[in-house]
Image (cartoon, rainbow, N blue to C red):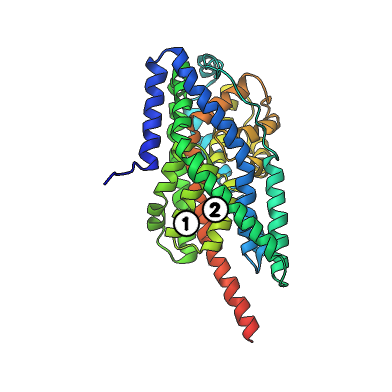
Amino acid sequence: MKKKIGLVPKLIMGIVVGIILGSFAPEGLVRVLITASTLFSAFLKFVIPFIIIGFVTAGIADLATGAGKLLGITTGIAYGSTIVAGTIAFLVASNVFPAFIDSSVASQIGDPEAGMLSAFFTIPLEPMVDVTAAIVFAFTMGLGISALRNHGKGETLHKVFQEFQEIVTKTLATVIIPLLPIYIAGTFANITYAGQVWAILGVFWKVFCIVIPMHLIYLVIQFSVAGAITKKNPFQMLKNQIPGYLTAVGTQSSAATIPVNVECAKNNGVSKEIREFCVPLCATIHLSGSIISVTSFAVAVLMMNNMDFGLSVIMPFILMLGIAMVAAPGAPGGAIMSALPFLPMIGIPSDGGLASLMIALYLTQDSFGTAANVSGDNAIAVVVDYINDKMNKKEKTRKTA
């Protein structure tokens, strides 16, 4: 019997192959791989709005009762979690980083894009709608269909979006997931060829050594709170989350991790309707790991340039990031790209050297930030499922009274 290789081993193989090719292969071969990776990236960006529309619309529409309330609760919890994560990151960074960061380190890192190879060709494939429009459309349609279903209507439209969700699921399963290792290989080959990842890590390894454990500690906090509320074992839930965490580390994409993460939620005992609504939604609106990274790197860059990094400067930035990251594409580097327009709030221009430094820092650890994002999504899903059960029981009691 032929044994199939799992996704995580394939992703690890992709990383190893990428590093080997980036180190030893001729430029032409590396560019072939980068071209394949670039084309895949364009297709992924094209599909992401459809993933949001397919999963979130059908997920909200399936909630025939209390959809609006549940959406509000989920969004509130996700935003609150993101802001708490950013605040903790600021407090840690502002107290720990001064021990090893000064303005002399900035000169040790050049342009992060220098030396990177470009694809032989690209295809201009723009998404049909942007991510923010997809979210608003999904909310509107989902809530509308849910409201219609409460009055015995809307079943035809409900079925349309359920079947659209099936198309999206099929696309993920047959195209995106199988091709991810090639995409990862191309990314790592380019970073390795440029040599930038090692130069950046050489200077900022101490920052990474603080940021990545912060992700993990915050995950333990999230699942501990979820466990305390729902009376579930937080460590068992963390163990169930390992496949989702590893997939996100390999793909750097919240969107690409959705199918695996939904399965993790199932193992945590989250009901079908909640996991299919909450996981895709939180993949878009809950970015606790990303905000820990962006806030920490912003403080680091400000410190290196002797700029003000006080609470009055950073807190409005964190509050705005929590909203801005809702529009972040669930693709590699999506969060930092959404954060760029708001960097001037803390004195960092959106283009130029400092912004490039922020991008380089973020992308180097993007895997771990994304893994923290998607893992935290399931802590929220467990709590939302618990709240939904309570709401349903209350509704049944009211109807029987």
Q: Disc 1 marks which amino acid?
A: Ala
Indicate the position of residue 131 as horizontal and vertical percent values.
Answer: 67, 42
Numbered circle sitting on residue 42: none
Mark 2 neighbour class, 10 Å CA radius: few under 14, some 14 to 19, many 20 or more: many
Q: In this view, does 122 lie to the left or right of 230?
A: right
Q: In this view, does 127 lie above or below 54?
A: above
- Residue 177 visible? The answer is yes
Q: Left or right: 354 with respect to 231?
A: right
Q: Residue at x 29, y 44 (%)?
A: 3
Work out whether 36 lies above or below 9. above
SS at mark 1?
helix
Give the quadrant of residue 234: bottom left
**Disc 1 and disc 2: Cα gap in Å?**
8 Å
Q: Which of marks 1 and 2 is nearer the N terminus?
A: 1
The residue that appears at 42% across and 19% down in the rendered structure is 22
How many numbered markers are drawn? Answer: 2
In the rendering, which numbered label is found on residue 279? 2
Instruction: Give percent across and percent down for residue 64.
Output: 65, 68
Residue in the foreground of this view, choosing between 340 and 279: 279
Label 1 sits on residue: 265
- Give the residue at the far front of this rendering: 1
Give the SS element for disc 2: helix
In the picture, which quadrant includes the C terminus?
A: bottom right
List x then y, in percent, for residue 251: 48, 37
Crowd around label 1: few <14 · some 14–19 · many ≥20 (10 Å): many
Residue 88 visible in this rendered orientation of the protein: no
Residue drawn where x is 66% and y is 64% of the image: 67
Front-lying residue, 231 or 311: 231
Please determine whether, in this image, residue 344 is positioned above or below residue 24: below
Q: Please, what is the three-letter code of the amino acid marked with disc 2?
A: Val
**CB atoms at circles 1 and 2 under 8 Å apart?**
yes
